[in-house]
Image (cartoon, grey):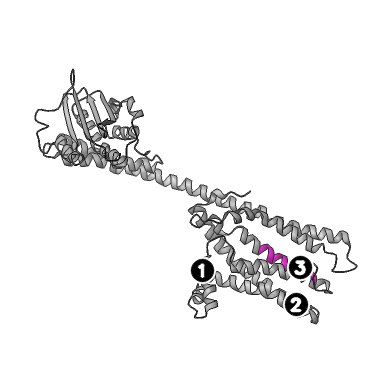
Amino acid sequence: MFDHALLNHVAYATALRYNGEVYQWGAAARGLCVCALWVVLAWFPPDSLPQASAQLLPVTVGAITTWAHYRPGVLDRLLASRLTVIGWCGRHLSGVKGRATVDLSGVLECGGILVALLLYVGPVAVRPLPAPVYVLGLAVSTVHIWSAFSQAMIDAGWYNPDAPPTRVLVRLRPLIPLALATLSFALFAWPLYAEREDVQVGILGASLLAASFLLLWPYTFIVEALLRSALATCHVEAGTVRRDDALTLHSLVKNAVRSLMRQTTDDPGVGAETRALINELALVVEEARLVLLDQPEPPQSLPTLVERIRKLMPHDQRQIVVLDEACSTTRCLGKTDFGLVRRVLPDFVTNSWKAGAQHVRVSVQVEENSARLWVAVHVKDDGSGIPTGAGADPYGSLRVLESHLRRFEGTIEHQPGPNKGTFVCARWRSVSH
């Protein structure tokens, strides 16, 4: 009946703010109701005052407890009290705050007002009572019941994702209005108040009273609709902010990094490690931009990695990089192996692009050799080939990558293609299998 999918931090925070105001006013209103019930006792028969006072005592203590519950200063003083009972009460109230559970203030207020209602209706109702006193007492009790149980129905604890309510309470929640309506009808229709009471009038009054408690359903639906609206608004606004941030990241950071890449590509004074770090920075920026656009990278996704490497290249050259179809059946890579692929592959593709290649084919495979798994990254292009002596340069990209892979028993091999271009293979012992 109720949408419990609202259990998230946004809805919970919204409910806390909403209830913070409503609860304070509600506690004050119920306090006034309790005071009115005590004043009405002045018109009760003298012999009924002990019974009436005893029946009003639980709801009175409940109203005081609720007031203390929502007054931080008072709650702190209860916690600091040296009296065992008061200290326990303070710890209890502090522990149940923000949770939908059975607590002392709720039991005393909700249960106490039902006991107080028995002063006016039901088998133990006090009589005779003047008609104005009867009507006033019944009206004040009804207002208190409605306020107490309406706040129980929309308590922020129902939406607390860190301390969700129990399944029993979740199932009982939608039954509260029906139980109140049934109980109030049974009590009000009890034909013991006045001998001259018209039965039809009594049934009509009982029905109206019961119907008033059924209004707790639409009231709860309205509050939850407001929470859904707040949640939807938050998502829309957050999406707008994220898109703006992604645009800013693209305009100010990604373009600057790409300019830096182009500037350092042909500069012989820039070392290979520096260029590799710039490539890595460009990839990180692109990943961050896509995350802001709600396009997070699937775990160990080779197609996504290749697509993001493409976006580091000029628009008119992105289509030259193709991922081998066989990679779709490749065994899932672990986190460390995928991190190594992410480190090696951008450098290989960049080298092919710099060599003027028009076709670059990428393949990543998990190979089994002598009961040991190896990860192999293959890049084949039709470029001008690797410059003479590039592999021997201790500061060249291939040598830097190879020194990094040696920690995983890895190597890098490169050789000319069958017609033209270059075939490069990086292999290392799988770390994640």
Residue 94 has which mark?
1
Mark 2: which amino acid?
Gln
Q: Which residues are magenta?
A: 134-147
Q: Quadrant of residue 377?
A: top left
Q: Secondary structure at mark 1?
A: helix
Q: Residue 399: in sight, yes or no?
A: yes
Whether residue 137 is in magenta: the answer is yes
Q: Using the numbered discs, state the Cα–Cα distance from disc 2 to disc 3 in whole angstroms.
A: 17 Å
Q: Which residue is mark 2?
A: 51
Give x and y (percent) for residue 237: 46, 47
Would you call the spot at circle 2 few (<14 residues within 10 Å), some (14-19), or many (20 or more)? Answer: few
Mark 1 vs mark 2, CA separation in Å:
33 Å
Q: Residues within 10 Å of mark 3 (few under 14, many from 20)?
A: many
Look at the image and tell me in which quarter the C terminus lies.
top left
Badge 1: residue crowd in 10 Å (few <14, some 14–19, many ≥20)? some
**Residue 302, position as x, y percentages in the image:** 33, 33
Place of residue 387 in the rendered image (x, y in percent of width and height, measured from the top left): 12, 28
Q: Is tag 1's residue or tag 2's residue first in the polypeptide sequence? A: 2
- In the picture as drawn, the residue positioned furthest to the top comes out as 419
Judging by the rendered image, the residue that carries numbered circle 3 is 138
Q: Nearer the viewer, mark 2 or mark 3?
A: 2
| Left or right placement of residue 285 versus residue 385 in this view | right
Q: Which residue is at 83% across, 58% downward?
A: 204
Q: Tag 2's secondary structure? A: helix
Residue at disc 3, secondary structure: helix
The disc, 3 or 1, on the residue closer to the chain's N-terminal end is 1
Q: Is residue 174 left or right of residue 234?
A: right
Q: Is residue 51 magenta?
A: no
Q: Amino acid at mark 1?
A: Ser
Question: Is residue 270 placed above or below 120 in the rendered structure?
Answer: above
